[in-house]
Amino acid sequence: MKLVSAIVRPFKLQDVRSALASHDIYSFTVAEVRAFGGSSGVVEFYRGATYTEHFLPKVKIEIIAGDNMVPMVMEAVQHAAWTGKPGDGAVYVQDLVEVIPVAGVLVPNIDAA
C-alpha cells in the first residue's frame, strides 16, 4: 500500500475530489496547510503598508491506495489540480508499512488475577 499526498491550491479541491470520485475513490483526508516555495509569494496591502506573504494557503490531500492504483490516483490529482502557473503544488508517494483502523482494533481483556 502507498500513501499518496498532494499539496494543491484550495480552489482546486473540488476538482480533485470530482476526479477521484470518477475513479471510485471516496475516502481521503484533507487538511489546510501553508506552503513556501514554487511561487514568489503574494503582495498584500494592510493599513497603508505593503508586505509579501511567502507562506501561501494550500490544501493537503492524503489518499491510501493499493500499489496498482497509485499511477491512476497520481494522474487524476495532477490533471485536476493543474492551472499551468507556478505554485500548482506537488504529488508525493510513500510506502505504508502497516495500516490499523482505529474502530477495528480489539483491545485484549487483561485479567489482574
Image (cartoon, rainbow, N blue to C red):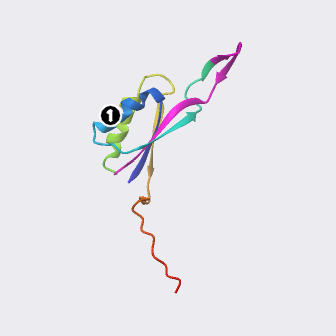
Q: Is residue 68 left or right of residue 98?
A: left
Q: Observer-nearest residue: 24 or 112?
A: 112
The x and y percentages for residue 98 are 43, 60
34 vs 89, nearest the viewer: 34
Secondary structure under tag 1 reads helix
The quadrant holding residue 36 is: top right
**Residue 4 appears at what percent x and percent y?**
42, 45
Magenta extent: 44-66
Q: Main secondary structure of the magenta part?
A: strand
Q: Residues within 10 Å of mark 1 (few under 14, many from 20)?
A: many
Residue at 48 percent across and 32 percent down: it is 89
Residue occupying the far top of the picture: 48
Per the image, the residue denoted by label 1 is: 19
Residue 73 sits in which quadrant? top left
Expressed as whole percent of the image width and height from the top left, the position of residue 26 reads: 33, 42
- Tell me what residue is drawn at x 53 percent, y 83 percent: 112
Quarter of the view holding residue 13: top left
Task: Give the amino acid type for the residue marked by disc 1 in the picture.
Answer: Ala
Position above or below: 70 against 88: below
